């Protein structure tokens, strides 16, 4: 038996001691220092800080955050000032920059960038706009992870994966995407090879871990082979095996004799877990197998999502239920059966929807993003030094957390707003004729205490769900090739999903085509606490994420890959080149969930009450659309800009 065939045990050669770039390095130079300086809460507000030594990272020559590894997403240094504000720390008035703008946008996610784009197009091409974001890169969730492996560029999405929605794109969102040069269907046909891994004989697999199921086992062929064959060697009881086969392949009506409309109503009142347990009569091992199946769609397990929404998204078990297509009010963002109506067309760029963010920045600041097409932007190197130039009408200022916004005078008659933000440990103030708050909606009451109490309560309730997308750079993907697997569902593990980077060749970008080449993996973790109400689960998960050091993520990544790929000869000590953990304590925008939310007409829901304009301030972000999708972020920007422009006549 070779070394690689020995059963893997903790502490055997996981390779954590290897010198992989595990903290924030920029082209070999440690740049975490500057952001670390604004980390500690009190120092975030240090009025007497030495300005020269507190320069924000964006101001440093050669600054290029997409290549940073270690803890990304909500990275250290990005959230401490906001949490200090939440905890009641007073930052003081701040230094007046004497800068004035036509518009200040809070948040450089897709919503904020779209708001700047729409404002310039509808108000004036030379409108003076400042965009502020607390992160060290723009894009919000649309985050680019960039690796240079064996001399070649490899890209993955640190957050938002693709252009995709269960509903067709609105005219506005589709129009913007087209204006940016993206023809979703044509480009998808040209650059994406969905069948690539299949053509190499790779399939989906499920990993059963010993802690949950009693033994480590990788079952390959889910979705392609009969479940009886797939689950042949799985550590499951005969009953669980039969249950899973029945759920995946059977056609049983679990509510015989009940009309479709009544069935749908019943299914909207129970979780998918309850459906499996009480109607399908699945046993506990089967429930454990399906528990994280809804993590990718809703960032919470099957105990907190309605069975009807799971039906609409094509989950198994409903084939024999004869449910008619069409939506009912008690459905989440799954209007009439995603699989029935088809949602939007889909397209995955190698860095996900970071390409949309980069194209928006190109439209606002052409000198920062070289090139002229949606294909060449993929390999374009953004010149971050161009983002915040004093002589530019549009300025994008990173590492800048807004901590206050108020009207100069009465909100109903004011002509200006003033915003304060923390950057590199100092507080600054700017003024503008108006402001779009495209940031997380739940923090707006802290920024604008003068808002009506009812609106503040609605805003506070819009809290995003946490999740983690880790990008793992591998020396090669021979283990996947040997095992015949391209994607692994691991219901009991730290990361519930592991996926090989999609095959997309676009412009001059080439993704890996042979197993001996470097490859990026995406591993997804959703921290939640089954059994609690949805928002309590999210809260516990968010706290867990913020307390988890990089070393814990790294160890779990190495351990899980070693165990899942053991029989493919995977060696975590030598096969892993780099790890980027994109943690998103504020990830998916909250959507209507019929299990937990009051049944209200759409126009009375919290997101609608929350987004009411307030004087010269309007509210965007996907939160205000109650949909964790890019088109929602764009639509909300469109609305917020139109509301504001009514005051600019
Ligand atoms: C892991 C993940 C995967 C996803 N996958 C998809 C997908 O495949 N397809 C899809 O359509 N959607 C997806 N989404 C949903 C995604 O949220 C939207 O697509 C969209 O990117 C949201 O954009 P936004 O501008 O509304 O919000 P955000 O991207 O959150 O941008 C808001 C920005 O405001 C900043 N901000 C907050 N407070 C302040 C402050 N006080 N001062 C300054 N800045 C502040 C935030 O840090 C952030 O950068 C995904 C989301 C996540 C988290």
Image (cartoon, grey):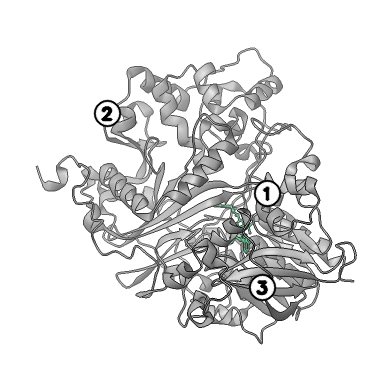
Task: Tell me which image quadrant ligand 1 sits in.
Answer: bottom right
Badge 2 or badge 3: first in the primary sequence = 3
> According to the image, label 1 marks what residue?
168
> Label 1 to label 2, Cα distance in Å?
42 Å
Q: Residue most toward the front?
A: 48
- Check disc 3 and report the residue beneath it: 94
Neighbourhood count class around disc 1 (C-alpha, 10 Å): few under 14, some 14–19, many 20 upward: some
How far apart marks 1 and 3 lie (CA) works out to: 45 Å
Examine the rendered structure and indicate whether residue 379 appears above or below residue 483.
below
Q: Which residue is located at x 26 percent, y 46 percent? A: 562
Q: CA distance from mark 2 to mark 3?
A: 65 Å
| N-term-proximal mark, 1 vs 2 | 1
Q: Residues within 10 Å of mark 3 (few under 14, many from 20)?
A: some
| Contact (Cβ within 8 Å) of mark 1 with mark 3 | no
114 or 318, which lies in front?
114
Q: If the image is split into quadrants, where does the C terminus sit?
A: bottom right
Q: Is residue 49 left or right of residue 244?
A: right
> Which sits earlier in the primary sequence, circle 1 or circle 3?
3
User: Residue 388, located in which quarter of the rendered image?
Assistant: bottom right
Q: Which mark is residue 233?
A: 2
**Which residue does the image show at 68% across and 65% down from the upper left?**
114
Which mark lies nearer to you, 1 or 3? Answer: 3
Residue nearer the viewer, 555 or 450: 450
> Does the image show residue 383?
no
């Amino acid at each position: 038996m070779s070394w690689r065939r020995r059963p893997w045990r903790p502490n055997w050669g996981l390779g954590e001691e290897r010198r992989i770039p595990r903290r924030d390095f920029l082209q070999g130079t440690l740049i975490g220092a500057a952001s670390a300086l604004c980390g500690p809460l009190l120092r975030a507000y240090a009025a007497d800080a030495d300005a020269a030594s507190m320069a924000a990272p964006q101001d440093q020559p050669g600054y290029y955050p997409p290549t940073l590894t270690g803890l990304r997403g909500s990275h250290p240094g990005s959230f401490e000032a906001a949490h200090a504000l939440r905890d009641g720390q007073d930052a003081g008035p701040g230094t007046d920059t004497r800068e004035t703008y036509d518009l200040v946008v809070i948040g450089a996610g897709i919503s904020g960038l779209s708001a700047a784009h729409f404002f310039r197009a509808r108000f004036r091409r030379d409108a003076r706009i400042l965009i502020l974001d607390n992160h060290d890169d723009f894009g919000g969730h649309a985050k680019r992870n960039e690796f240079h492996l064996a001399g070649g560029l490899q890209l993955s999405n640190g957050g938002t994966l693709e252009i995709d929605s269960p509903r067709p794109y609105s005219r506005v969102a589709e129009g913007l995407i087209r204006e940016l040069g993206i023809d979703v269907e044509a480009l998808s046909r040209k650059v994406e090879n969905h069948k690539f891994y299949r053509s190499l004989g790779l399939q989906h697999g499920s990993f059963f871990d010993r802690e949950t199921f009693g033994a480590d086992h990788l079952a390959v062929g889910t979705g392609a082979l009969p479940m009886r064959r797939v689950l042949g060697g799985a550590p499951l009881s005969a009953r669980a095996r039969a249950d899973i086969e029945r759920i995946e392949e059977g056609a049983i009506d679990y509510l015989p004799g009940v009309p479709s409309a009544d069935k749908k109503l019943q299914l909207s009142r129970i979780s998918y877990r309850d459906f499996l347990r009480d109607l399908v009569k699945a046993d506990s091992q089967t429930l454990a197998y399906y528990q994280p199946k809804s993590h990718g769609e809703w960032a919470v397990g099957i105990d907190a999502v309605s069975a009807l929404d799971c039906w609409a998204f094509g989950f198994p078990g409903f084939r024999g239920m004869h449910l008619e297509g069409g939506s009912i009010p008690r459905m989440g963002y799954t209007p009439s059966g995603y699989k029935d109506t088809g949602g939007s067309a889909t397209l995955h760029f190698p860095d996900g929807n970071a390409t949309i963010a980069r194209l928006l920045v190109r439209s606002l600041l052409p000198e920062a993003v070289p090139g002229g097409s949606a294909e060449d932007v993929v390999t374009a190197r953004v010149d971050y030094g161009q983002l915040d130039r004093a002589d530019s009408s549009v300025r994008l200022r990173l590492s800048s957390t807004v901590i206050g916004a108020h009207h100069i005078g009465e909100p109903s008659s004011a002509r200006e707003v003033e915003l304060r933000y923390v950057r590199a440990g100092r507080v600054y103030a700017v003024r503008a004729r108006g402001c779009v708050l495209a940031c997380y909606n739940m923090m707006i009451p802290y920024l604008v205490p003068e808002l009506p109490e009812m609106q503040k309560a609605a805003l506070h309730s819009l809290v995003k769900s946490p999740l983690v997308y880790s990008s793992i750079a591998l020396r090669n993907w021979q283990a996947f090739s040997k095992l015949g697997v391209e994607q692994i569902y691991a219901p009991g593990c730290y990361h519930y999903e592991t996926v090989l980077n999609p095959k997309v060749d676009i412009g001059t970008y080439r993704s890996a085509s042979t197993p001996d080449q470097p490859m990026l993996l995406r591993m997804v973790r959703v921290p939640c606490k089954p059994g609690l109400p949805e928002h309590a689960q999210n809260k516990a998960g968010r706290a867990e994420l913020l307390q988890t050091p990089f070393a814990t993520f790294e160890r779990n990544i190495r351990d899980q890959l070693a165990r899942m790929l053991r029989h493919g000869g995977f060696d975590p000590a030598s096969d892993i080149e780099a790890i980027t953990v994109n943690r998103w304590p504020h990830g998916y925008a909250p959507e209507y969930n019929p299990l937990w939310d009051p049944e209200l007409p759409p126009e009375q829901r919290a997101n609608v009450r929350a987004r009411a304009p307030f004087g010269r301030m309007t509210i965007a972000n996907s939160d205000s659309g109650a949909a964790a999708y890019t088109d929602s972020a764009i639509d909300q920007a469109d609305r917020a800009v139109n509301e504001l422009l009514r005051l600019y006549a």
